[in-house]
Every structure is written in structure tokens, then in C-alpha cells.
Image: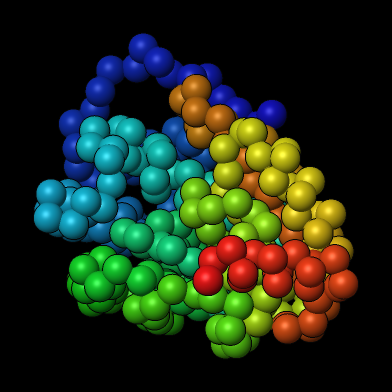
Amino acid sequence: MVGHDTGRNRPKTTPGPESLKRWFERSGLPLKEHQYLQLWQYHRLIRKRNAELDLTRIYQFDNMVQKHYIDCVLVAKLMKWRVPSPLLDIGTGAGLPGIPMKIASPGTEVILAEGRPKRVGFLFEVVKALDLKGVEILGQKIHSSFDRQVNGVITRALETIPKTLLRISGCLTRGGMAIFMKGPHCDEELEEALENYPDYRLVQDISYLIPHSPHERRLVILRRLSEPGIRGRRSAVRDQRSERKGS
């Protein structure tokens, strides 16, 4: 498992851009000065709107930096390849992981998909305030009928891996990557996905700790072998059953 000291007894820091910068540098994720300022501005917007929109249940500054911003940026470092572009962030909520990843990788085109109108409004506010270029906001849920072509899809604590593979069946390109930010115990759903979706191949599976914390995470990446809309027999049967249950 990739990890660092847990830092359980580390004193709480005073919120601010310099404190945020120290967290990233201590975690081996140095950014440019304007990127720290963007993350700090993003943090302030989340705190400002949280009571109204219920954007996160994590309130303490250090925890927010570690569990939200550092964890999201860390994904790009752990990946064997560059972050795929365009990258579709499904069920992004407050913009996680898409916005921190965009700040850290400004050349990546990011599509933020969110079905709740109030949170969609928040995303537009963030993109405007941070002057983020190459970010598109989709105010809708993504279903298997969604056929906008993307080279990568990422989800963070949204649903099981098989459900997401069904959801992106019409949009992820051949050779595209499905990126899953999961908790440590996802073996069963991963096994189910590989069994029922033979048109995907597991290309990375890494367990890690969020730096300087005891929080275990797992990064699972599948590469698509088929064209959008084309699925093997077993996955097609699985899709039909899932769609009947959801109707």
C-alpha cells in the first residue's frame, strides 16, 4: 500500500492559502502559486455555500484539504498515464474530483456532470470565480443513452463499478479509461464488473493512504476494449436486467 505517516497527533492548522500550500508540499504534491490560490478560493466558496447546498459533510480545514483536495490531485500522480482528456466527472456534486484535478492539470478538458440544479448553479459560480478554461458543466444525470464521446470517465464514491460501466456504455471511447476512486473494500464489485463486462480490462489497481492520515483509499482503472455502444453478450444481458430493475 502506498502511504505515509498518519499524522494523527499533528496539531490543527489555521485555515489559509499558506496552510493549504504546506499540506500539498508535505504530501509531495507541489503546485504553482496561482494553483494554491485557486484551491483556496474554491475552498472558501464551498464553505460559503455549504449550509445552503449541503456540499460536504466534512467541515474541518485539515480534513477538507486531505480528503477532498489532496486525494483528488493525488489520483493524477498515481496514474500510470496522463489524465485522459476530455474527462467526464459523473455525479461531481461540489466539483469533486473534477475541479481539483482541473486546477492541478489545467490542460485537461473536464466535463462536470451533476443532476441537482442547485449544485449545478454552484459549479457555474466556481468556474466563473476561478476563471477556469476548458470546463463544461452538464446539468443532467448520465445514462447509457448519453453518447457524447469522452476519453476518460471518473467517479468518486458514486455507485458500484458495474453500475457505472452500464452508465457510460454510450460515451466512453475505445481505449478510454474508466477511473474509480474507491474505498479499500471493492473486490466484490470489481470481480462482478470484470465478469459481466468482458469488454473492459483492468489496467491499474492500487491501494494507498491519503498522505499523513490513516484513511485508506483504492484507485481502480479499467480500459475499454470495444467501441461505444458495443458490449459483449454477458454485459448486454447484464445491462438488460439492470435497466428493467431501474424502470
Judge left or right: residue 22 versus residue 148.
left
| Rendering coords of residue 93 (x, y %) | 35, 60
Q: Is residue 91 left or right of residue 94?
A: right
| 247 vs 132, nearest the viewer | 247
Name, please, the residue furthest toward the bottom: 148
Left or right for 24, reference 5: left
Residue drawn at 18 percent across, 31 percent down: 14
Q: Residue at the location (66% across, 39% down)? A: 186
Q: Position of residue 122 (x, y in %)?
A: 22, 68
State the scheme by which the image is colored: rainbow
Q: Quadrant of residue 92?
A: bottom left
* Closer to us: 157 or 231: 231
Residue depicted at 59% across the width and 63% down the height: 245
Q: Position of residue 6 (x, y in %)?
A: 48, 20
Q: Quadrant of residue 198?
A: bottom right
Up-down relation of residue 98 to residue 213 (above or below): below
* Foreground of the two, 165 or 78: 165
- Residue furthest out toward the top: 9
Is 67 in front, or is 166?
Answer: 166
Q: Position of residue 178 (x, y in %)?
A: 66, 63
- Please identify the quadrant where the N terminus is shown: top right
Q: Quadrant of residue 197?
A: bottom right
Q: How many marks?
A: 0
Q: Residue at x 43, y 53 (%)?
A: 31
- Horizontal arrangement in the rendering, residue 140 relative to residue 156 (left or right): left
Q: Is residue 121 visible?
A: yes
Using the rendered image of the protein, determine whether residue 19 is visible from the camera's viewpoint.
Answer: no
